[in-house]
Amino acid sequence: MNTDKPADKLDIAQILRRIPIFQELSDEQTALLAAHTREKRLQKGEMLFQKGDLPRGFYAIVYGQIKLAFPSPSGNEKVVEILGPQQSFGEAVMFMDRPYPVLAESLVDTLLLHVARQAVFDMIESDPSFARRMLAGLALRLHGLIRDVESYSLRSSAQRVIGFLLQRMSGGDESGDVEIKLPTSKQVIASRLNLTPETLSRIFHDLAAHRLITVHGKHVTVHGVRRLREYEP
């Protein structure tokens, strides 16, 4: 069940300071935003908004995961993004004052902050640096979408999967084993990579056959990061 709680139930100001676009605000500015921010708790599989709903602000994720997707009449939705803690979404649609072009659904139990549109507009008018940070965040999102289009157009299915796995590694020994936990179901990951679930399963099987990975449910063991990076399907 959806629950909107008053801002004073959490230390909203302290949480806002952890969100990248808010980190350089003064205490006074943060307090102003916090006064116009509400928490939103979602259970796993709960819908935040549907395509066509009107925005009244934008969201930042405290913990959990949100899936943004294009719905289809057949039910085979196309996942656009999988978002996690300290990421925000909905800013561009808020500025355009247009309905959401995608749906948003929680993949796990999730806590969100909803920042009211008018509070953001007031902050932009009073603080040019805040406006620049908002623009920078939108620009990064645009570059990410461009990279996606490039990936879908120029990289093979297997290269997309390998790239997805490599993005989830943080340094370490490139010759030894590295454990990865997939962030969500293989069906959602396949849609995010513009693949069918069957194709994703086949690629995992092929990589395992070459002893590059071992897959147990959502847990993937990479047997040598360098070998996986240099693999040519």
Image (cartoon, rainbow, N blue to C red):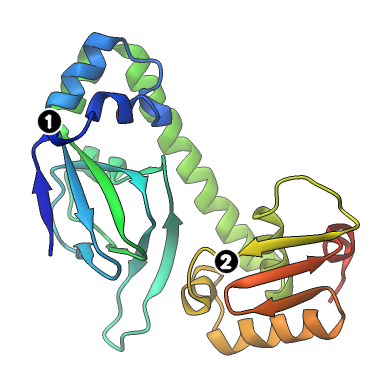
**What distance separates the C-alpha of mark 1 from that of mark 2?**
35 Å
Place residue 67 in its image quadrant: bottom left
Q: Is there a contact, CB below 8 Å, between mark 1 and mark 2?
A: no
Does residue 79 sit above or below 88 in this rendering? below
Taking the spot 34% from the left edge, 19% from the top edge, the residue there is: 130
Q: Find numbered disc 2 in the image and state the secondary structure of the residue it sits on.
A: loop
The residue tagged 2 is 182
Taking the spot 35% from the left edge, 61% from the top edge, the residue there is: 68
In this rendering, would 34 be left or right of 135?
left
Q: How many marks?
A: 2
Frontmost residue, 91 versus 225: 225
Mark 1 or 2: in front is 1
Taking the spot 31% from the left edge, 89% from the top edge, the residue there is: 74
Residue 22 image offset from top left, x and y in percent: 35, 24
Residue 158 image offset from top left, x and y in percent: 72, 75
The residue tagged 1 is 8
Taking the spot 69% from the left edge, 78% from the top edge, the residue there is: 215
Does residue 38 sit above or below 54 in this rendering? above
Q: Residue 51, which numbered label?
A: none
The three-letter code of the residue at mark 2 reads: Leu
Q: Find numbered disc 1 in the image and state the secondary structure of the residue it sits on.
A: helix
Does residue 166 sit above or below 216 in this rendering? above
